[in-house]
Image (spheres, coloured by chain):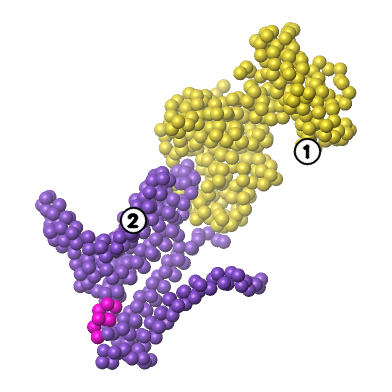
């Protein structure tokens, strides 16, 4: 069927199309253009050369950083999904509707405060003479080095993502039809096994979306690896920062940014394809 | 008489302040088709859920095959349930749904598949075995749900309003499927429904529940012809219920004075006391109609209010001079001969032995 041109609907859609074009598509195209510019005497000049791409993609430090960023964001995503699951499960299946609403509200509160402030507050807790090491000291353990380590980076990522992951997981699992869990029990499924047999398959889509969000946020975050991870092993966002600071290499930073976006696009498409795949013949 | 398969003794179930089931005593026998019927909130579904172990009774005893079941977990029971919503797993194919229970019991893969396919074939949906559940029609899903429960070869099948989501003509077909299956397998069916036609069409015995209590247990015919009390008489419908004071008695009958007139009814000895209150019901299909005043013991003149046409049978709704509602069920062709219209005056009459005396209160 041929779609009729609807002036009224079009009028209402225009602002968002305009907004996206102006503030998303435009800058993106500009960034792609910049990646072909060259820097001469610390000044960026218009050009169309592949030198930045060549320089960045042949350097080991870029690929080391690329691998490390995927690794640490991936680890953080797994930890967040596992840590959040029991809490989300309890909120979705054990809590009353009222308690669940309150819990979701409380989980939003961390977003009211600056992420940077929340990150700095970890200094007090994780420092060599901080709260955790002081407590461990009482039982004769430590002190452990927690700041400026991979552990610090993951803690920072979790500060950003954990509340969101709990919210997404809870909302997903709260929508699971409880009759299906009872049906599984009725057919001889043990209580814990219902998680694997029923809850996970039913909330697969939502859980994959939660993990995807968590990964995207961690992958692009600069605060946690910089302040808590000590940036000894730079992640890609830190690499962007370093590249722009050292010699005004905006074109090379653009190359890193484009590589990051391409990676996230690929992962997002793969995740969504996985999330919406269905079993059985159609 | 053999031991009953299931016994409820003094079973109560409270949800906080809400009493779902109060003081239930019930025996369910091996191989019978028992329907539990009542309006919503009467406790019929709670009763079924207690049988499946999905709710534990607050007090009392439930035994299955003589064993006390109060604290036995749902997955340790042999009481598969067919759910109102069917509760099929949308992420599994039809065959995988049927295999689910066998898998939980540790039946090996080939055996599981063989038995699942056998049941899907038996339910005449073998060709859809590998289809995704969401692509099946309502009737096909119904059959998958039945196969999923029956493949477990249970001694008792629980059904919670399984036909309520189907079209009227499909309901009739599934009723035939269910009754045939129950006779072939010889297992006990416990069938919860709010539909009188479903209960009466299939069940050997019907339990009528009201506000957490059993109002009557009996064969469909018993309940239809001899309702135990006013609640059942009203719930079963198509009954004319009249109440009044006994003014005289004879060896078998009493005369009752009601606002609609004086009527004679056959009554049991303990109800034949002059001066006491008495309520009786007359089935709508046992009432005769005539234009002229009949020569009968029980007669009342009524105005025709409306008629309800269901196939060949028609229900007339009428009102007597004092405003009491009467119902008469008759063949459509008989009604045409009478040539009635709204507001017509006609006479109703019935025999004293067709007046059924209800228990007090």
Which residues lie in the magenta part?
A240-247
Q: Which mark is residue A231?
A: none
Mark 2 belongs to chain:
A
Marks 1/2 same chain: no
Q: Which mark is residue A109?
A: 2
Q: Mark 2, residues whose alpha carbon is within 10 Å: few (<14), some, or many (≥20)?
A: few
Q: Is residue B184 visible?
A: no
Q: Nearer the viewer, residue A257 or B131?
A: A257
Residue A244, magenta (yes or no): yes
Q: Chain B is shown in which shade?
A: yellow
Q: Dot 1 corresponds to which residue?
A: B309
Q: Residue at x 53, y 59 (%)?
A: A280
CA separation in Å, label 1 and label 2: 63 Å
The quarter of the image holding the N terminus of chain B is top right
Q: Chain A is shown in which shade?
A: purple
Residue B240 placed where, x, y %? 72, 25
The quarter of the image holding the C terminus of chain B is top right
Quarter where residue B171 is shown: top right
């Amino acid at each position: 069927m041929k779609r009729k041109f609807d002036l009224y609907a079009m009028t209402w859609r225009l602002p968002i199309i305009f907004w996206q074009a102006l503030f998303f598509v435009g800058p993106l195209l500009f960034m792609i253009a910049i990646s072909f510019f060259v820097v001469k005497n610390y000044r960026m000049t218009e050009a169309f050369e592949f030198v930045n791409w060549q320089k960045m993609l042949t350097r080991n430090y870029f690929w080391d950083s690329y691998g490390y960023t995927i690794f640490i964001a991936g680890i953080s995503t797994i930890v967040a999904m596992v840590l959040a699951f029991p809490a989300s499960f309890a909120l979705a299946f054990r809590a009353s509707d009222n308690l669940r609403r309150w819990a979701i509200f409380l989980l939003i509160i961390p977003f009211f405060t600056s992420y940077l402030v929340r990150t700095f507050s970890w200094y007090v807790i994780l420092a060599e003479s901080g709260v955790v090491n002081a407590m461990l000291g009482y039982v004769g353990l430590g002190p452990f080095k927690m700041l400026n380590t991979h552990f610090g980076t993951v803690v920072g990522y979790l500060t950003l993502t954990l509340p969101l992951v709990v919210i997404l997981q809870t909302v997903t699992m709260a929508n699971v039809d409880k009759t299906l869990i009872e049906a599984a029990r009725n057919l001889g499924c043990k209580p814990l096994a219902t998680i694997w047999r029923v809850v996970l398959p039913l909330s697969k889509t939502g859980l994959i979306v939660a993990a995807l969000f968590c990964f995207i946020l961690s992958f692009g975050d600069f605060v946690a690896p910089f302040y808590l991870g000590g940036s000894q092993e730079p992640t890609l966002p830190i690499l962007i920062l370093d590249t722009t600071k050292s010699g005004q290499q905006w074109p090379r930073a653009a190359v890193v940014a484009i590589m990051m976006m391409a990676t996230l696009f690929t992962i997002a498409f793969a995740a969504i394809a996985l999330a919406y795949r269905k079993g059985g013949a159609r | 008489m053999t031991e009953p398969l299931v016994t409820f003794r003094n079973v109560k179930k409270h949800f906080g302040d809400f009493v779902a089931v109060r003081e239930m005593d019930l025996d369910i026998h091996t191989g019978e088709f028992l329907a539990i019927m009542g309006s919503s909130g009467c406790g019929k579904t709670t009763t079924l859920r207690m049988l499946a172990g999905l709710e534990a009774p607050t007090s009392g005893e439930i035994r299955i095959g003589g064993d006390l079941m109060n604290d036995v977990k749902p997955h340790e029971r042999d009481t598969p349930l067919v759910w109102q919503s069917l509760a099929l797993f949308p992420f599994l194919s039809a065959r995988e749904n049927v295999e689910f229970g066998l898998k939980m019991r540790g039946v090996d893969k080939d055996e599981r598949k063989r038995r699942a396919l056998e049941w899907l074939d038996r339910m005449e949906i073998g060709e859809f075995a590998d289809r995704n559940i969401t692509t099946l029609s309502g009737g096909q899903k119904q059959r998958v749900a039945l196969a999923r429960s029956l493949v477990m070869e249970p001694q008792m099948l629980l059904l919670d309003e399984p036909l309520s989501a189907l079209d009227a003509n499909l309901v009739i077909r599934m009723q035939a499927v269910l009754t045939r299956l129950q006779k072939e397998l010889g297992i006990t069916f416990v069938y919860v429904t709010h539909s009188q036609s479903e209960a009466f069409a299939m069940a050997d015995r019907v339990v009528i529940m009201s506000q957490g209590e059993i109002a009557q247990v009996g064969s469909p015919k018993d309940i239809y012809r001899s309702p135990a009390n006013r609640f059942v008489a009203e719930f079963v419908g198509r009954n004319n219920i009249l109440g009044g004071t006994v003014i005289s008695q004879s060896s078998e009958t009493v005369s009752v004075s009601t606002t609609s007139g004086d009527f004679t009814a056959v009554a049991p000895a303990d109800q034949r006391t002059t001066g006491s209150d008495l309520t009786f019901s007359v089935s709508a299909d046992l009432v005769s109609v005539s234009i002229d005043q009949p020569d009968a013991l029980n007669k009342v003149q009524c105005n025709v209010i409306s008629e309800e046409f269901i196939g060949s049978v028609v229900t007339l709704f009428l009102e007597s001079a004092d405003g009491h509602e009467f119902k008469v069920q008759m063949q459509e062709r008989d009604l045409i001969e009478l040539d009635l219209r709204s507001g017509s005056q006609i006479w109703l009459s019935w025999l004293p032995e067709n007046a059924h005396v209800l228990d007090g209160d």
